[in-house]
Image (spheres, rainbow, N blue to C red):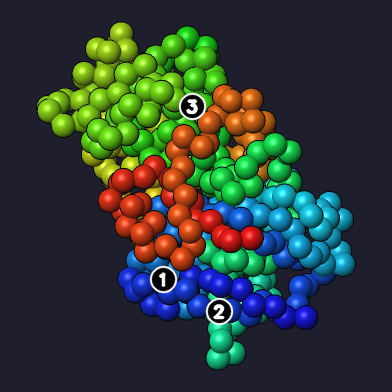
């Protein structure tokens, strides 16, 4: 039985996201249908809409969705109608990386998350004229009131957390927090510098506080975010403007260099600043996504002196294990997602996109009238 939904459709790179009525077909045995309560707007969605990620068009984007399961396929065994779920990235759950707990490096990550279709090439959405639309963006395409997903990328939420606000746990917040708690693993009383105070960077700040870091420094030119970063756990927040050598200044602030750095911008200049801020030894994790190839050069002597530069996708976490942990931390008041979020009704999509692009909000979440 097909059903209709309202979705934001991108018909050409760089074009507008237009609200349209779409049709969702019958579920396959391994699929679930989720009525979305809220979906975050992620930088990766904007990069894809501009043509920086090779997803085919026309397409429905959105990959930080959360909602209620309203229907399940015949082969679904771990979820039930009525479950509250947050949707994360898709992975095969069978390859070597998946089976050793590192699904963000799934060998089929690109086709499952960027391909725009099911694995057999079919799509899960049609427009009002009956033409097929690409979906399955990160296994969900949650800029839509109804979403087809699978058990692979749907994680049951614990009780007493806001379904409407939970979507960003599935990508941006897991990326920042996972990088700190699962990749860098800073010792208590250590020092960390976070470059870029968007949702990813703010999540890293909160995770650093959870880890017990004694010195947590946030870096961002948008001074409207500085007070929030302090509230979330930063011991100091700096605007990079005005420092001829930001790395040297940070080394002074940290008594010889930071133990860890999180770089969520992705530009050559910021990667080099992050490496320069480290002590010896020290580790910098780079997370920022840039369109296409993004060559950078670094000073090799930074690495010879015991420093490490590592790239991280999706926090290098297994969503089925990590997202419930984040939700529990949120419920306990240690990971206050609500302080990052401003909600916008789905019909105000353009307002939300404008607020994101201007830096006015840390995390915009689109809400649906359910």
Percent of width and height locating residue 60: 51, 70
Residue position marked by numbered label 2 in the rendering: 21
Percent of width and height locating residue 121: 64, 78
Query: Mark 2 and mark 3: span between their CA atoms?
Result: 39 Å
Q: Residue at x 32, y 57 (%)?
A: 354
Mark identifier at residue 17: 1
Vertical comparison of 199 with 354: above or below: above
Place residue 146 in its image quadrant. bottom right
Percent of width and height locating residue 320: 71, 43
Q: Which residue is drawn at 46% across and 31% down?
A: 204
- How would you rate the neighbour count of disc 3 (Cα within 10 Å): few for under 14, some for 14-19, many for 20 or more? many
Query: Could you tell whether 35 is left or right of 229 in the image?
Result: right
Query: SS of the residue at dot 3?
Result: helix
Query: Mark 3 and mark 1: span between their CA atoms?
Result: 32 Å
Query: Could you tell whether 358 is left or right of 133 in the image?
Result: left
| Residue that protrudes farthest toward the front in the picture | 369
Q: Residue at x 55, y 79 (%)?
A: 21
Vertical comparison of 294 with 249: above or below: below
Residue position marked by numbered label 3 in the rendering: 206
Vertical comparison of 160 with 116: above or below: above
Mark nearer the N terminus (3 vs 1): 1
Q: Tell me, yes or no, whether the two marked residues, 3 and 1, touch with CB atoms within 8 Å.
A: no
Which-is-in-front pick, marks 2 and 3? 2
The answer to whether one can see residue 101 in this image is: no
């Amino acid at each position: 039985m097909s059903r209709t939904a309202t979705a934001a459709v991108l018909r050409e790179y760089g074009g507008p996201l237009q609200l349209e009525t779409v049709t969702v077909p019958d579920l396959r045995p391994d699929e679930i249908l989720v009525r979305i309560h809220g979906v975050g707007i992620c930088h990766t969605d904007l990069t894809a809409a501009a043509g920086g990620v090779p997803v085919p068009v026309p397409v429905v984007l959105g990959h930080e969705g959360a909602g209620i399961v309203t229907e399940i396929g015949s082969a679904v065994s771990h979820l039930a109608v009525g479950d509250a779920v947050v949707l994360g990235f898709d992975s095969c759950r069978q390859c070597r990386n998946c089976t050793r707990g590192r699904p963000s490096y799934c060998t089929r990550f690109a086709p499952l998350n960027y391909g725009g279709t099911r694995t057999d090439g079919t799509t899960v959405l049609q427009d009002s004229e009956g033409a097929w639309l690409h979906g399955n963006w990160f296994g969900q395409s949650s800029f839509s009131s109804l979403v087809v997903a699978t058990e692979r990328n749907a994680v049951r939420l614990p009780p007493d957390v806001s379904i409407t606000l939970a979507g960003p746990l599935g990508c941006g917040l897991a990326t920042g927090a996972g990088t700190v708690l699962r990749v860098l693993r800073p010792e208590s009383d250590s020092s960390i510098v976070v470059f870029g105070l968007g949702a990813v960077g703010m999540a890293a700040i909160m995770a650093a506080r959870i880890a017990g870091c004694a010195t947590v420094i946030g870096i961002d030119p948008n001074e409207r975010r500085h007070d929030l970063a302090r509230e979330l756990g930063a011991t100091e927040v700096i605007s990079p403007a005005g420092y001829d050598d930001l790395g040297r200044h940070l080394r002074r602030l940290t008594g010889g260099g930071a133990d860890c750095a999180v770089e969520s911008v992705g530009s050559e200049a910021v990667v080099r600043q992050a490496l320069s801020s480290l002590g010896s030894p020290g580790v910098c994790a780079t997370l920022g996504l840039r369109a296409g190839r993004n060559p950078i050069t670094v000073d090799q002597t930074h690495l010879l002196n015991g420093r490490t530069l590592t790239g991280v996708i999706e926090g290098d976490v297994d969503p089925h294990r990590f997202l419930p942990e984040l939700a529990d931390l949120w419920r306990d008041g240690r990971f206050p997602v609500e302080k990052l979020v401003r909600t916008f009704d789905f019909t105000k999509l353009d307002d939300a996109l404008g607020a994101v692009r201007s830096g006015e909000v840390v995390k915009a979440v689109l809400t649906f009238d359910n």
